[in-house]
Image: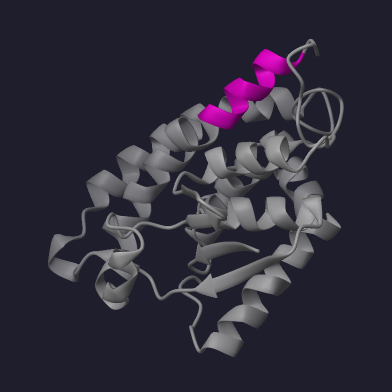
Amino acid sequence: MITLYHCDGARSFRPLWMLEELGLAYELKMLPFPPRVLAKEYLALNPLGTIPLMIDGETRMTESSGICHYLGVKYGPTPLMVDPGEPAYGAFLNWMYFSDATLTFPQTLVLRYSQLEPEERRSPQVVTDYAKWFLGRLRAVEAASGNAETLCAGRFTAADIVIGYALRLADSIGLSGEFGPNVAAYWARLQARDGYQRAREAERRAGIAQGVKPRIRE
């Protein structure tokens, strides 16, 4: 049984969504955010205290986009993955890495310095600067989503999952009002997917069952 440690609204939603799209059995363990402070016992499993942590037999992984890639390869074949022989393979990999390294990184600073830090440590300048950074990088998604329903390979893939989470995070921290028309339409399409809806419901049900309140209300 695959076990996924998850915080509501955190980047661990990427592998959760991937698990639902693949139809795999898993156990979802909810943690309060940030777990390194509010669930110190978790440090015995993941010394970094970060989310996600996925355990699959002897395999332990902590990088959300990497977990999606792992699941698609190990439990495929699946159209969610793009094979090396396909013309879109390079674009697929680029989106997989772009998702966290380029899109999610600046959002974490917006979230931290607008909501998570104590009032005296919050910084409107940091929030403004990194929101602009994120929105500038989002131009790549605006261009790609203007030409097709999905990002690459002419179908929904794991690239849409990992980029889609970045859009969910942007929505939750108040940046979705700045989406261009193509990104806004793309985000609406992603939210309408059954797999996305199942992942949101799994997150909600597990939080209630395990007594962990949502971190971000949407």
Give the residue at x 37% y 49%: 108
Q: Give the extent of the magenta segment.
A: 88-97
State the image coordinates of residue 183 (x, y, percent, origin top left): 69, 38
Give the residue at x 55% y 45%: 166
Q: Identify the image quadrant of residue 41.
A: bottom left
State the image coordinates of residue 141 (x, y, percent, origin top left): 64, 29
Q: How is the image coloured?
A: one colour
Q: Nearer the viewer, residue 192 or 56?
A: 56
Please say if 182 is above or below 35: above
Is residue 89 inside the magenta stretch?
Answer: yes
Give the residue at x 43% y 32%: 101
- On the question of residue 119 being in view, the answer is yes
Say left or right for 57 vs 48: right
Q: Nearer the viewer, residue 170 or 69?
A: 69
Q: Identify the image quadrant of residue 82.
A: top right
- On the question of residue 217 being in view, the answer is no
Give the residue at x 61% y 27%: 95
**For the N terminus, which image quadrant?**
bottom right
Say left or right for 132 vs 156: left
Task: Spot the residue most to the left.
Answer: 120
**For the C terminus, which image quadrant?**
bottom right
State the image coordinates of residue 129 (x, y, percent, origin top left): 31, 38
Please say if 83 is above or below 197: above
State the image coordinates of residue 2 (x, y, percent, origin top left): 62, 60
Q: Main secondary structure of the magenta part?
A: helix
Please say if 145 is above or below 166: above
